[in-house]
Amino acid sequence: MARMTAAQAAVEILKKEGVTNVFGLPGAAINPFYKAMKTNGGLHHTLARHVEGASHMAEGYTRAKPGNIGVCVGTSGPAGTDMITGLYSASADSIPILCITGQAPVAKLHKEDFQAVDIASIAGPLTKMAVTVLEPAQVPGTFQQAFHLMRSGRPGPVLIDLPIDVQMAEIEFDVETYEPLPVYKPAATRAQVEKALDLLEAGEKPLIVAGGGVINADAADLLLELAELTGVPVVPTLMGWGTVPDDHPLNAGMVGLQTSHRYGNATMLESDVVLGIGNRWANRHTGDLETYTQGRTFVHVDIEPTQIGRVFAPDYGIVSDAKAALELFVAAARERKEGGRLKDRSQWAQACQERKRTQLRRTNFGVTPIKPQRVYQEMNRAFGRDVRYVSTIGLSQIQAAQLLHVYKDRHWINAGQAGPLGWTVPAAIGVATACPDETVVALSGDYDFQFMIEELAVGAQFNVPYVHVLVNNAYLGLIRQSQRGFDMDYCVQLSFDNLNSPEVGGYGVDHVKVVEGLGCKAIRVTDPDEILPALEKAQGMAHEYRVPVVVEVILERVTNVSMGTSIANVTEFEDLAEHGEHAPTAVFANLD
């Protein structure tokens, strides 16, 4: 067997487990690991500007492609605590990332040594495992277990904390015979699937709700096949957006209080049986539970046993990986169809499509300052079907989900449950690193953009091209809108007169100068007719210069976006589309 440092063994295990990219920042307590990466080779390291940024890069990298596991590395103390938001975001959305931190020597862990913090205890509630390795010989087994846990059951993050002396100690480790541990995932039985199909068939107006678990399981094709076999329309959740293409005749639209469609909510209210797969009945999706559940039969399939009944008690629950369940659903549905034992759902599907055709929000506004709806209209035109969108939270994200279109799984990448501001820039760098030859487009409001704007320098330094659409109203727009209920507009304005950039007209930060100062390219748009040319130009610039390109669109200061407290009570603040010209890039804009 080969003799090597424990840090070298860790590096070799990363490679054996399929890791090729690492995001992080070196420091004194993690330098032995960096020495191992340099000595052993085989890993591409992206130097972040902030360790939280590195953790979100790892998230974006994982979310972009099936099988990816993003890795972020930092030194001891504050580097570990900086990762906590990334661990929370990953845990909340069932995303496996591996965080590796340096630590003070084992003998000094109890002495309040410089930058020594019990990061394992801090990270414990947000991870599937958080451990400080005290014995060098336990490093290989700990890393092996980490990958096993991240992939097994409900996916999620792991943190491994390595004291500096543990990293440097030599151990015996046989790289050649190392193998990943078998992955465990619970699987439905045929009897469970048959019962679920019986319940689905008993309804006259059934729906399938497709959650992020379908995407995590890489099972979107199976979900679509099940829908087409049964003829049952599909409601994707925000995290499941892309499981069924937006223009597919069985896509019934999204449901919820914010990131939803009028026609999706209307269809849910008409339904009588709902089969949820890989979803968690998030409160922004369900809203008022009495309205959401009344008069409906629910079947819930989820990989995590404790998710069944967590929000409300379904009529029938199945603990299963989404892919394992869908393989059985498809097989059973195919047999029933061949035997003529499936109902004809065409009339119900046509009714869903009629709602989808006629209940559209207006996007075609030509006024200045620009209304945000127009931005999403032009994004639909500019980026086409194959774009991968990245976003996190705010009015920009909510309205984008109402008005953009997604046609493939993993083409809407969103920090769904946690929604941390600042997530978008580093996550987009992670996505673009994973998909270097694809069109990656990030979307931020001005506050999200400013939170971790420094990470744009990472994209410039490492030639990670993508387009970042920045909708700027110089406001904390979502918080301002929620403050309407408190009759205030307090501490949410980002506008000020910039002494150095009077041309920004009181909108405060000159994002173009900042972006260019960080080594990237930027375009500012103030005329609605210039949005599309700017987006097209940005794609060309990203390809030419191989850096992030920001398109800043100056919006009207105040826009209230459609939302409410119940799926039956969503407030619309704008006139709705009355004919096709009002919403020319809607999937069904043939209103005339």
Image (tube, grey):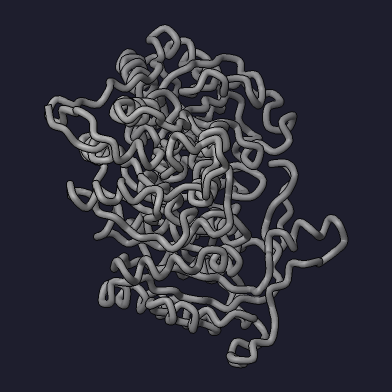
Q: Does residue 248 appear anywhere in the picture?
A: no
> Is residue 348 depicted above or below 438 in this figure?
above
Which residue shows up at 68% across the image and 65% down it? 476
Q: Nearer the viewer, residue 138 or 13?
A: 138
Picture coordinates of residue 172, whole percent (x, y): 19, 28
The N terminus - image quarter: top left
Q: Nearer the viewer, residue 549 or 383?
A: 549
Q: Quadrant of residue 501?
A: bottom right
Q: Quadrant of residue 188?
A: top left
Which residue shows up at 51% across the image and 56% down it? 423
Picture coordinates of residue 74, whole percent (x, y): 42, 50
> Is residue 96 depicted above or below 496 in this figure?
above
Picture coordinates of residue 158, whole percent (x, y): 43, 34
> Is residue 184 depicted above or below 234 in this figure?
above
Which residue shows up at 43% across the image and 50% down it? 75
Q: Nearer the viewer, residue 40 or 434?
A: 40
Q: Disc count in the image?
A: 0
Picture coordinates of residue 51, whole percent (x, y): 46, 54
- Left or right: 484 in relation to 227: right
- Left or right: 584 in relation to 152: right
Q: Residue furthest right?
A: 487
- Left or right: 454 in relation to 47: right
Q: Does residue 505 appear anywhere in the picture?
A: yes
